[in-house]
Image (cartoon, grey):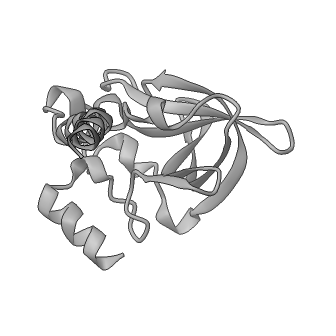
Amino acid sequence: MRHFWWATLLLLTPALLFSFQLTGNLYAGGDADLKGWEKDSQYNAFYQVEQYQKIKGTLVDIIEVTPLPDMSPGLGMIFRLRDGEMVTVHLAPSWFAKFVVYAFKKGDPVKAKGCWAEIGGKKVFMASKVRNGEYFEIKFRRTKDGTPFWTMTSKEITQERLEE
């Protein structure tokens, strides 16, 4: 029985440490890390919830994005859609979305929900949700109004989860 306890502890410790790191990272963004990503920013004005759409494809790469000059870096993805078109998908500020690199890998079937926008002369897809196959989905924005989760307080996020 004692051996089982140590084995369980050994297996669960990395998972617990990762979840604590992830929780801390979600709320670790300071003002400098939010530059340009604020709720009422020029960038977020491009997200038009009434134009909400879905796209499907294959993950080609996870990239760093800086949508507008002087913004803090963010994370994005490159999707190859079923018709072969390559699409840049914007996710969130880097500090908020950096766990994505652990949840997705090149070649994964992916789905995204969000809105198309032209930013800096380029057509991009601003994701509210990204799904890896049929099993794992990450939400970046509130579906009903497009509010970015990275701009919400922990109390607002908790309330959002209760309403789901």
- Of all residues, the one furthest to the bottom in this rendering is 163
Residue 33 is situated, as x and y percent measured from the top left of the image, at 22, 28
Is 138 on the left or on the right of 86, as rendered?
A: left
Give the tally of numbered discs: 0
Q: 17 above or below 128? A: above
Is 52 on the left or on the right of 96, as rendered?
A: right
Is 86 on the left or on the right of 70, as rendered?
A: right
Is 22 on the left or on the right of 42, as rendered?
A: left
Residue 72 is situated, as x and y percent measured from the top left of the image, at 30, 25
Residue 28 is situated, as x and y percent measured from the top left of the image, at 16, 35
**Residue at the spot 19% in from the left edge and 39% down from the top edge:** 20
Residue 113 is situated, as x and y percent measured from the top left of the image, at 57, 57
- Of all residues, the one furthest to the right in this rendering is 83
Image-quadrant location for residue 18:
top left
- Of all residues, the one furthest to the front in this rendering is 1
**Residue at the spot 49% in from the left edge and 38% down from the top edge:** 103
**Residue at the spot 20% in from the left edge and 41% down from the top edge:** 2
Quadrant holding the C terminus: bottom left
Q: 105 above or below 125? A: above
**Residue at the spot 86% in from the left edge and 43% down from the top edge:** 83
Q: 115 above or below 120? A: below
- Residue closest to the eye, 151 or 101: 101
